Image (cartoon, coloured by chain):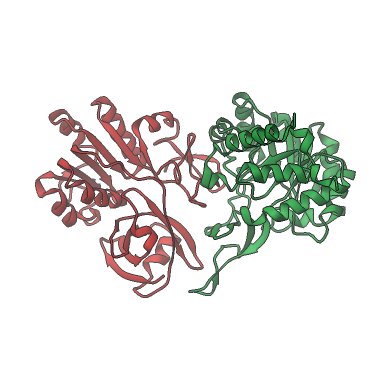
Amino acid sequence: MRILGVETEGPTVKTFTFKDRGCARAKPGQFLMLWIPGVDEIPLSILDAKEDGAVSVAVKKVGEATQALHNKKTGEIIGIRGPFGNSFTLKEGKILMVGGGTGTAPLLFLAKKSASKATKLVFVIGAKTKEELLFIDKLEETCSKNNLIATTEDGSYGIKGLATTPLESLLTKEKFDMIYTCGPEQMMRKVSDLAEKHEIALEASLERLMRCAIGLCGSCVVGKYRVCRDGPVFTASQLKEAKSEFGVSKRDFSGKRIPLG
Amino acid sequence: MLASGILGYSTETLERIVEGGAGAVVTKSVGLKARKGYANPTIVQTSCGLINAMGLPNPGINEFVKEIHEAKTSLNVPLIVSVYGFAAQEYAAVTKKAADAGADAVELNVSCPHVKETGSEIGQNPKILAEVVRKVKAVVERPIFVKLSPNVTDIVEIAEAAVKAGADALTAINTVKAMAIDTETAMPILNNKIGGLSGPAIKPIAVRCIYEIHEQVKVPIVGCGGVTNWRDAVEFLLAGASAVQIGTAIAIKGPSIFKAVARGIDAYLQRKGFRSVEEIVGLSHRS
């Protein structure tokens, strides 16, 4: 299918939009497999899915495949399989979302769907620099400026530190009903530790090397779970079962367990 | 039992398959050295089945023996390790290590259709296949299964060669060589261009292969290829299989498919007045 639009979101991130009837029905948290003909096929979280069939994904330039995709322009052809995996469960009450890097993408999709249900929606977003903070405008629109807390590692915007830096005081001050998180796995591990300490339910979206995306090949297993089929969204208790791997290790192309980079 | 190539990297996922009702599990194919496999796309979903060309990704036997040890400690069903190699002595070396680590049996992958110089390139040639089986049998006592390729002119000739060389059982069949081309880009979709078709589309091919082999060969046949329900499994048994493997159908029905199929077979046996599975193995050969 053809790329309908390409938008630059930051120095390393672009958003691609295309029409796909299947993925247009996707729920927040689900992912798709995007084929860059002649190069690779990669798993990507769905950033938005609209009734008119328009679907978008945010892609960070990290390697050969994402570089090849970044070179593509409107009108060029890509392939789409999906949507795959489960989704975040929509909850009412006071909601906290913690997104790091491109992990913000599925959470923005979730925030848009949650905004009408939640009595309060606070979003903590983290990135290395101000330029790399994604979707700030859209998040301000969705959960209001007061409820958006930004952190940067170099201090160029918002609080200096990691997305987890403001969490301890935030959770001490306020009682949330649900935490959703997506981003670097060590960050999510820390978020889930804090959620456990403060006795708040949590869902986290994980990323692994993927091949089949339908639960057969075993490339993406974490503990007994297949990220592509049982996830990518996992509850705190599932993550606890997989604690020897969650935030610790992943499998490389050969299936060998290696430390998370 | 669980077919090779599916979820076979880790003990924890194999445990789930056993919880789902599998009576035995076969691991992913493992070789002497680690292999990354091919770049994606490694799978194409078609209307009649899946085409895959993973490229035999595996961590290598020296790393995999840890998983075998762990699996043997926690699984209460037989563990069959699938082995591939690029030469007869490689098959033998990997089999020896797998058996030493505790594998209850070894299934020789001489039928992978998408990696050069191994798999079906060995299993399509009765002489080379016989040499592989002999070398393997010379180093281990454990039962050796030979997984056959349907991508041959005469599968019976290959089956007979394997048994003559010492195979204790035959698994039939591996995937059928296949391909998919994207119409928009006019490009083959799989990174490796050619892969192996699995799923319902190949079931009738498997039934024919099992039937033909059962007519000529005395060792047990493990039926594999496109089983999605108990009726498919019974068809395999009637054709001459003594056991049945399931792989692709797990994508749709989940690990509990094993329980559902086993229950269906039991109900069939009861309804038809048979006392055991043995009574229907090869039953269609009566006439």
Position above or below: B117 against A257: below
Q: Can residue B47 be spotted in the picture?
A: yes
Instruction: Look at the image and give the colour of chain A.
Output: red
Quadrant in which residue B201 is drawn: bottom right
Estimate the x, y position of residue A72 in percent, counting from the top left.
38, 71
Estimate the x, y position of residue A213 in percent, counting from the top left.
48, 51
Count of labels in the image? 0
Estimate the x, y position of residue B260 in percent, counting from the top left.
58, 36
Q: Quadrant of the C terminus of chain A?
A: top left
Quadrant in which residue A180 is drawn: top left
Q: Residue furthest right?
A: B164
Estimate the x, y position of residue B78 in percent, counting from the top left.
68, 30
Position above or below: A118 against B111: above
Instruction: Look at the image and give the colour of chain B.
Output: green
Position above or below: A40 against B91: below
Q: Residue at (83%, 44%) from the top-left corner?
A: B133
